[in-house]
Image (tube, rainbow, N blue to C red):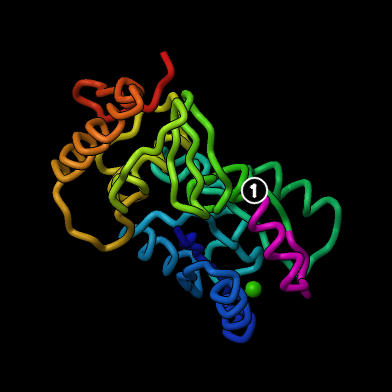
Amino acid sequence: MPAHILVVEDEPAIQELLALNLIQAGHQPLRALSVEHAMTLMREMIPDLILLDWMLPGMSGIDFARKLKTDEMYKNIPIIMLTARGEEADKVRGLDVGADDYVTKPFSPRELNARIKAVLRRRAPQVTDEPVEAGGLHLDPATHRVTGNGKFVELGPTEFKLLHYLMSNPERVHTRAQVLDKVWGDRVFVEDRTVDVHIRRLRLALTATGHEDLIQTVRGVGYRFSKQ
Ligand code: CA
């Protein structure tokens, strides 16, 4: 699954460079020139990661990061701060408000990609190609295979993505809206009950290896992948 990465950068040339770099690394960039613009885009879609410039017109990147970290809806989005200022005090300030990492301009595309990869692996494993193990199931995004108890689980593409997301975020309750956003992606108009349909199919497929009980319904809230 490509990661949707929101680039908030007011210098068009740097933004272009960042976007091209992201596309080459297999990600899908979303581009904003200001915090205001970023907020408009985020109402349509929650990105998997934000590359956030420090110095922006209007609200600064650091104030935006602070604001996001206090917002229930957005506080879990990983943030990498971009800045032309290389001072240690700034770096500490950036990490203090909850940024996951910090890159100083001019940056090397290779270094930035490595940092993005590291942050995604830590914070959003479902958008990377890393295999996931949970509850006795093994899921490998590279080969698109799921195994459990020495058998293959046959899954359609949506059920695979759904299981990948749930296994990458175990023991947490996910609302249908969160599942839709993360599994179906942006700007898709599907109804909440579509999630229920695919959960049913996923459970049915998991009966082949006896793992159907790992997908739990949390009444009135959503779903959880749990070993208990
Ligand atoms: Ca700037």
Q: Is residue 85 left or right of residue 172?
A: right
Who is closer to the viewer here, 228 or 58?
A: 228
- Specify the principal SS of the magenta part: helix
Who is closer to the viewer here, 6 or 28?
A: 28
Is residue 217 magenta-colored?
Answer: no
Position in image of residue 178 (x %, y %): 32, 42
Task: Look at the image and give the residue range highlighted in magenta.
Answer: 103-119
Who is closer to the viewer here, 83 or 148?
A: 148
Q: Which residue in the protein does label 1 denote?
A: 99
Note whether residue 68 is visible.
no
Quarter holding residue 97: top right
Q: Can you name the residue that lies furthest to the right here?
A: 88
Give me the residue at 57% from left, 83% from top: 16
Give me the residue at 36% from left, 38% from top: 153
Count numbered badges in the picture. Answer: 1
Compared with 169, 215 (above or below) is above
- Which amino acid does the dot numbered 1 rest on? Ala
Give me the residue at 52% from left, 55% from top: 142
Position in image of residue 214 (x %, y %): 36, 23
Quadrant of the displayed image that contains ligand 1: bottom right
